[in-house]
Structures are given as C-alpha cells and as structure tokens.
Image (cartoon, rainbow, N blue to C red):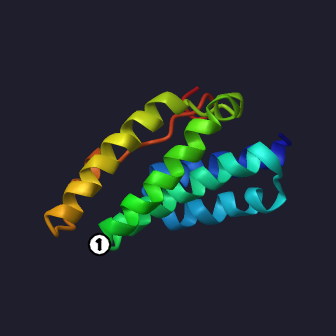
Amino acid sequence: MSTESELALEHGIDQFNRREYYAAQEAWQTLWNEAVGAPREMLQGLIQLAAAFYKLQVGEPSGTVKLLEQALGRLDAGRDLAEGMGIKIAPLLESSRLWLEQARRLVQEQRSAYDPASLPRIHSRHLDA
C-alpha cells in the first residue's frame, strides 16, 4: 500500500473514531475505487461499517442491521488483509457483532435511541502508536 493510500486509510479511521461516519465512507471510497480483489472487498466492508453507524445516527436501525451483516462478512473474510494494513480487526469485529445484536433489538422494539459512548472504534498500529 502506498504512503498516500495509508494516509487515506488512517484519515478514514480517524473520522470513524470521531463518529463522522459519512466522512469516513468518503475517505475510504477513494481507496475502494482504485482497489481490486481482496483489498477492494475489505474496503467495502469498512465502507459498509461506516454506513451502518451513519444509519444508526440518523435513526434508521433497520439499515444498520442490514449494513452490519454485510460489513461483518466482508471484514471477517478480509481479516488477514486488514491486520496487514495495520487494523486491529478482532476487537472491531467483536464490538460490531455486539452492535448488530443491539441494532436488532432496536428494530424489534421500534426504538432508535442508543448510547453513542458505546459505539465501536477502530484501532490501528499507526494511530495507537
């Protein structure tokens, strides 16, 4: 991955961690447009993850459920690639699975309120260093 691509990835991670999910999607979209194969799929997972939490922010937990299901599949399949890109994927997958269950409960209970303090963060070797 080029230095420019690494910076774009980290910029998206920083935006995600500031709960600026729409902006994170945009940062990763640039990388996704240039990627092929497995990296493209893993980036699609990150984009879907950000989109899922954006849907939560705008009060659409059913969209959160759908996007988290898709994102988790792609991120789990791209686990080794994500780790190679510096993303600590295991804690992200764990917290996202917990949020999937919470989003399902929100849909079932026809609620959209949630605790933003418990939203997942992406840890990476670059930002955590």
Q: Classify residue 4 as left or right of residue 17.
A: right
Q: Residue at x 74, y 51 (%)?
A: 40
- Of residues 68 and 117, the one drawn nearer to the viewer in this rendering: 68
Q: Residue at x 40, y 43 (%)?
A: 96
Q: Is residue 39 above or below residue 28?
A: above
Q: Residue at x 64, y 45 (%)?
A: 10
Q: Position of residue 17 (x, y in %)?
A: 46, 48
Figure quadrant of residue 112: bottom left
Q: Position of residue 116 (x, y in %)?
A: 27, 54
Q: Classify residue 34 as left or right of residue 77.
A: right
Q: Is residue 9 above or below residue 110?
A: above
Q: Classify residue 48 as left or right of residue 95.
A: right
Q: Quadrant of the C terminus?
A: top right
Q: Classify residue 92 as left or right of residue 33.
A: left
- Picture mark count: 1
Give the labeled residue for mark 1.
59
Q: Residue at x 58, y 51 (%)?
A: 46
Amino acid, disc 1: Gly
Element under disc 1: loop
Q: Quadrant of the N terminus?
A: top right
Q: Residue furthest left?
A: 109
Q: Is residue 81 above or below residue 33?
A: above
* Residue 49 visible at all: yes
Figure quadrant of residue 86: top right
